[in-house]
Amino acid sequence: MDPNVEKILKLPTKQKILILALVSIIEASALVWFLYLPKVKELSGLNAQLATLQSEINEKNRIANNLPKLKFEYEQLNRELALALTELPNSKEIPSLLTSITTLGKNAGLDFLTFRPKGEVPKDFYADVPVDILVSGSYFSVANFFAAVASLPRIVNITNVTFSDIKSVNNRMMTKVTCLATTFRFLDKKEIKDDKKIVPK
């Protein structure tokens, strides 16, 4: 038998108990320090990761639950954009639109004395396309012309309306009307700078 063990066995009972308790405390401390505490730290890290993943899952579930609503809103915005595109012509459609305006005026019984397109006025993503108009005809014809222009599928604003040379001819009130007809068109990407300012023409 090991001499050290024999010495311990010959010690009084109290000392034996004290040595046993001391050894047990050392072993318990070693277990806590080398096994328990690292596992507690690892568990804490895993709990934090779990909380993060759960938060991500909750957010993705919220987005997934809102997907039908977001899809509906996206489709609605696309429809509104398509409608806006029909109301704002592109550069190729401007000549035919201006021809339509003169046709409406002639059909209403007006004589065009002036029809002068002015320079475009670039805005953010579109440009104003103004046209100076001078027509002569009856009040009734002028009213019909304005109503027909308002009914066009494209946006055309009539402003700066001035009546002049008003007279009665064959019991009809005849007049000359000066106005500004303004339509609008989308600008191509080439016409817009990176800073969203319009490229000077």
Image (cartoon, grey):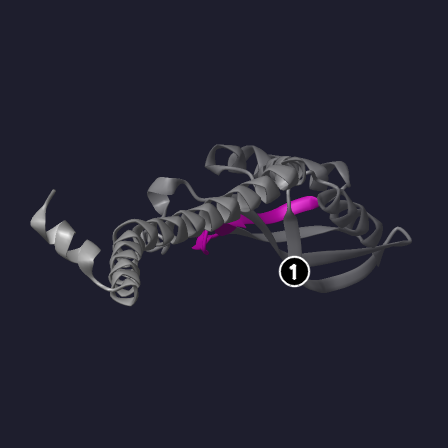
The answer to whether residue 165 is above or below residue 96 is below
Q: Name which quarter of the figure residue 19 lies in.
A: bottom left
Relative to 153, residue 23 above or below: below
Residue 86 visible, this orientation: no
- Rendered location of residue 183, percent (x, y): 58, 48
Residue at 38% in and 41% down: 189
Residue range (magenta)? 111-128
Q: Is residue 185 magenta?
A: no
Query: Where does the image place residue 186, in percent across and percent down from the top left?
Result: 49, 43
Residue 79 spot, x, y in % from top left: 64, 36
Farthest left residue in view:
3
Residue 2 appears in the picture as rendered: yes
Q: Nearer the viewer, residue 81 or 138?
A: 81
Residue at 40%, 47% in the rendered image: 46
Q: Is residue 46 left or right of residue 140?
A: left
Looking at the figure, which quarter contains the N terminus? Answer: top left
Q: Nearer the viewer, residue 61 or 55?
A: 55
Label 1: state its secondary structure: strand
Q: Residue at x 10, y 53 (%)?
A: 4
Residue type at the position of mark 1: Thr
* Crowd rating for badge 1 (residues with CA inside 10 Å; few <14, some 14–19, many 20+): few
Q: Which residue is mark 1?
A: 159
Residue 98, placed above or below residue 120:
above
Asked if residue 123 is among those painted magenta in the image, a careful observer would answer: yes
Q: Position of residue 180 (x, y in %)?
A: 60, 56
- Quadrant assignment, res 177: bottom right
Camera-side residue of 161 and 26: 26
| 105 to the left or right of 132 | right
Q: What residue sits 26% from the left and 62% below the top?
A: 22
